[in-house]
Amino acid sequence: MTSYPGELLHMDIVGPAQVASVSGKWYVLVVVDDFSRFSWVFFMEFKDEAFDFVRDLVLRLRNESHKAMRAINSDNGGEFRNSRFENFCRDLGLEHQFSSPYTPPQNGVVKRKNRTLVEMARTMLDEHRTPRRFWAEAVNTACYIANRIFLRALLGKTSYELRFAQRQAFASVWLQVLCALKKAGHLDKFESRCLDGIFSGYASNSRAFRVWILEAKQVVETCDVSFDETMPRTTPAFELSGDDEEGTPIFEDEEGVVNDGDAGAHRTGCSSYPSRYEFG
């Protein structure tokens, strides 16, 4: 049992995906704070990139808090059980806890989070009939939302509140049409002042939006946007539509991800979205 944010981190890797993301990623590293259940997601082309993301996150959390991090918890995968992790944990005085092979319940906190994020992302993609290559944008947005709306069962606060001691509201709708404003210094006199885009999520390390620029067919991060409130908020993102992929899995072993998440999970009925409360 932990008593403050940052004391213990759980981590796991989901993937590979059925298709590469729009940024060329195949895997997602999910990290969950034990006390608050605040989560981070990091997208990777290869599994062995996990160490760099974990190292940077741990060092950042140590700088943000005066309370010591005690341990990290993972499975026995080679991306976690290696000399880089061993040396890093030894240098910082961290205990690296490992779950036993083939026993997902021992890493149940992050397994349940995997299930929540994958089911949310799949529902978001299906609702807008969005190509599966946008899976990382959906997972990233699902994590952002989950941190701010799901309540920690026994504490009655969201993960964001428990970590930052304040609430944060948000109102943007995923895949809403918008205009990304160009910087004035880079414009010709008669050039358009904006680029047509679609809101695809939130930046991880800033207050910027992630925007899919339709003409360039790439994601950029910017604060300078103007949402088109005249477009129906439930309109599918027709500009993104491709083959009908509704209902198809995001990840190759998605059934395993969902079943792993069942370990110790609270059943909330047949809804595709999980309960507002998180258990465990």
Image (cartoon, rainbow, N blue to C red):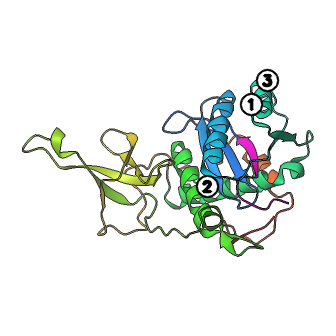
Q: Amino acid at mark 3?
A: Ser
Q: Which mark is residue 88?
A: 1
142 or 97, which is in the foreground?
97
Q: Amino acid at mark 1?
A: Phe
Residue 160 pos. (x, y %):
60, 63
Question: From where the camera sits, is residue 250 visible?
Answer: no
Give the residue drawn at x 7%, y 45%: 190
Task: Say which quadrant the C terminus sits in.
Answer: bottom right
Q: Amino acid at mark 2?
A: Arg
Residue 257 pos. (x, y %):
76, 48
Residue 35 pos. (x, y %):
75, 60
Question: Disc 1 to disc 2, how far (Cα)?
Answer: 35 Å
Q: Residues within 10 Å of mark 1 (few under 14, many from 20)?
A: some
Q: Which residue is mark 3?
A: 83
81 or 45, which is in the foreground?
81
Give the farthest residue toward the bottom: 156
Q: Would residue 132 appear left or right of 30 to someone viewing this image?
A: left
The residue segment tinted magenta is 1-13
- Which structural element holds mark 1? helix
Residue 42 pos. (x, y %):
60, 42
Give the residue drawn at x 46%, y 46%: 242
The answer to which of marks 1 and 2 sits earlier in the sequence is 1
Q: Which mark is residue 122?
A: 2
